[in-house]
Image (tube, grey):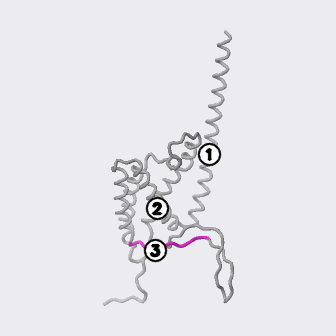
Amino acid sequence: MVTTKTPPTDRDSSAPLILPRQISALMLVALLYTAATPFSPISWLTGPVALSGTYFLDRLVAGLVLFCAFYFQWAIASLRAAVVVSLPAGGSTMQVRNGRMEQVRRESVPLWVWRTGEYWHFALAEAVVLGIAEFGGSETMRRLLVSAVILFLWVVGWSATPASLKRWAWEHIKVYLFVLVLDELRNVGVGALRGMAGGNQGRRRARW
């Protein structure tokens, strides 16, 4: 009988299973893209309201939210060890340190521990849910199920992503949003100029 000095860890037991998980993650990304398209979360929240800014907000938010969900799908499948799933939180809390009550800044609220062995249960459930969303025939159900899957991917994937990578991504996201806003302002300006030019031509034609 072979024994070891330390008990097997989650990292040791899950390492050989990473490649199958990553392959399944790619398949789930394709299924999520199919079920989520068209993805317009702002319009889904506002409902059938004719707001000129809704389309612009969807342009800013929808692509980023969906693309990050794709990455989180891959990050969850690539985990080699258990992670504590938590939600970012502000404010502070009171803790006892060295027999004294001290105010400590609270950066996150722990929810549960995600273990790599749970991945296949999650992947199967996600595939079933997305299949129902895609082929169920109900637009309302599709939106609810897709939103639930994306929310879960964000909650778990956020904790599975290193802080350094999140900072790097945020720097690039800010540049992307800046360029997108400039492009939208350019489109609005060009449309306004064309409208003014068309109005001036109409007035000149009316004179003659």
Quarter occupied by residue 13: bottom left
Point out which mark residue 179 bears: 1
Instruction: Give the CA distance from mark 1 to mark 2.
Output: 27 Å
Question: Is tag 1's residue or tag 2's residue first in the polypeptide sequence?
Answer: 2
Q: Which residue is mark 3?
A: 82
Q: Nearer the viewer, residue 9 or 122?
A: 122
Instruction: Give the CA distance from mark 1 to mark 3.
Output: 38 Å
Residue occupying image coordinates x 62% and y 44%: 181
Q: Residues within 10 Å of mark 2 (few under 14, many from 20)?
A: many
Whole-percent x, y for residue 103 in the image: 68, 78
**Contact flag, marks 1 and 2 (Cβ < 8 Å):** no
Q: Which residue is mark 2?
A: 153
Residue occupying image coordinates x 40% and y 47%: 139
Q: Secondary structure at mark 3?
A: loop
Point out which mark residue 110 bears: none
Q: Residues within 10 Å of mark 1 (few under 14, many from 20)?
A: few
Whole-percent x, y for residue 100 in the image: 69, 87
Whole-percent x, y for residue 52 in the image: 58, 39
